[in-house]
Amino acid sequence: MAQDTQLAGKTAFVAGGSSGINLGIAKRFAAAGANVVLISRSQEKIEAAAKEVSTFGKPAIGIAADVRDYAAVEAALKRTFDEFGPIDIVLSGAAGNFVAPALGMSANGFKTVVDIDLIGTFNVLRASFEFLRKPGASLISITAGQATRASMFQAHVCAAKAGINMLTQCLALEWGPAGVRVNAISPGPIADTEGMARLASTPEAEARVKSRVPLRRYGTKDEIADAALFLSSDAARYINGAILPVDGGSGCGDGAGDALLGLGA
Ligand code: HXC
Ligand code: NAP
C-alpha cells in the first residue's frame, strides 16, 4: 500500500493522548506523516504512548501536563512550537468520567470532571492560538452524545460536554477569520476504551448499549481516527464549527418514540 503523506510536514498536538481514542488518533496523525506531541498527567504513561506513536511515523514527544494547569499546557505548546514551528493540528480529548447519581456526587466530584473536560478544553485551545499556523490550523475537541442527551448518572459529563459543544462553536466563530477551523468529534460507544469499561462494565450492559446503536455494534478507535484525519485534511477545508457524530447513528432517535410503540431495546 502507498505510504500516507496527507499530513507530511505538519505538526499535531494531542491532549489526553496517553490512551484510548486519543492515542488512536495520535497514531493515525503520525502514520500520515505528522510530527506528534502528546500530553497527559502521567509522565510514565505519556512517555510509553510517545514511544508507541513513534513506531507509526517520526519520533513523537510525550510531555506530562495536566490540562487543568494553564501554564503547564502553555509550556507544552511552546515546546512544540520551538521544536517544530507553527502547530497545524490540535486535538483536545482529555476527559474524566465516573458513574454516579447527582446526589452521590460531591461539589468537588462534579467540578473535577468539568475542570478536566470543559475548562481543560478551553485551556488547550486558548493557549494554542498564538502557536498555530494561521491561516490553516485545524482544532478538534472531543465531545459525546451526552452533550445533547441527558443521561442518568452522568450529570457532570453531560454538563461538561454540552459546554464543549458551545465552546467549539464560539471559537469557530471568533477564529474563523484568522483561518483557524474549530470542530468537534462526538464518538458513540467505542470498543476497548476506558470510557466504555466504566459505562458498560458487564456483558449485559454492553449488549444493551449495542442494541441502541442503529448499526448494532461498538465503533472502533480507528473509525474515530479516520474522522480526525478527515477534519485535519484539506478535504475538510470549508468545515468549521461542526459537531461531527461518529456514532453509528446513536444520536438519531430519542428512544422515547420507540418505547411508545413498544419497539427497540
Ligand atoms: C462519586 C467520585 C467518584 C465516583 C471520584 N469521585 N470518583 N465521586 N463517585 N465513582 C470524586 C472524588 O471523591 C473527589 O471528590 C473528586 O471526584 C475528585 O476525585 P480525585 O480522585 O481526587 O480526582 P482526580 O485524581 O483528578 O481524577 C479524576 C477522575 C478519575 C475523573 C475522578 O476517574 C480519572 O482520573 N479519570 C481519567 C480517566 C477516565 O475517566 N477516562 C474515561 C473518559 S471516558 P471529593 O469530594 O471526595 O474530594 C468519557 C466518556 C464520555 O469521558 C461518554 C462516553 C459515552
Ligand atoms: P481514556 O483512555 O481514559 O482517555 C483519557 C485521556 O485523558 C487519558 O490519556 C488520560 O491520561 C488523559 N487525562 C485525563 N485527565 C487528564 C488531565 N487532567 N490532564 C491531561 N490529561 C488527562 O478514555 P477514552 O474512553 O479513550 O476517551 C477519550 C475521549 O473520548 C474523551 O474525551 C471521552 O470523553 C471521549 N469519548 C469516549 C467515548 C468512549 O466510548 N470511550 C465515547 C464518547 C466520547 P492520564 O491518565 O495519563 O492523564
Image (cartoon, rainbow, N blue to C red):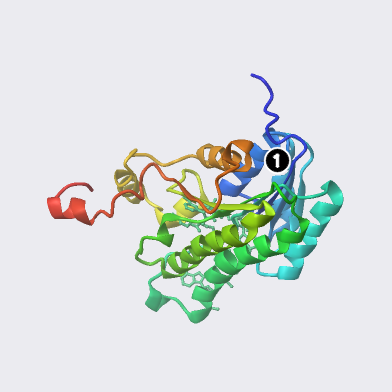
Q: Residue at x 61, y 49 (%)?
A: 19
Q: Of 41 and 27, which appears nearest the observer?
A: 27
Q: Residue at x 72, y 64 (%)?
A: 127
Q: On the picture, is 125 further left or further right than 230?
A: right
Q: On the picture, is 140 further left or further right than 30?
A: left
Q: Quadrant of the N terminus?
A: top right
Q: Measured from the top left, where is residue 38 in percent x and y?
A: 71, 51
Residue at the top extreme of this rendering? 1
Q: Measured from the top left, where is residue 154 in percent x and y?
A: 41, 66
Q: Measured from the top left, where is residue 259 in percent x and y?
A: 18, 54
Q: Of 132 and 151, which appears nearest the observer?
A: 132
Crowding at dot 1, Cα within 10 Å, few <14 / some 14-19 / many 20+, comes out as: many
Q: Measured from the top left, where is residue 18 in percent x and y?
A: 65, 51
Q: On the picture, is 215 further left or further right than 10?
A: left
| Res. 32 in view | yes
Residue at the right extreme of this rendering? 82
Residue at the front extreme of this rendering? 177
State which quadrant residue 236 falls in: top right
Residue at mark 1: 53
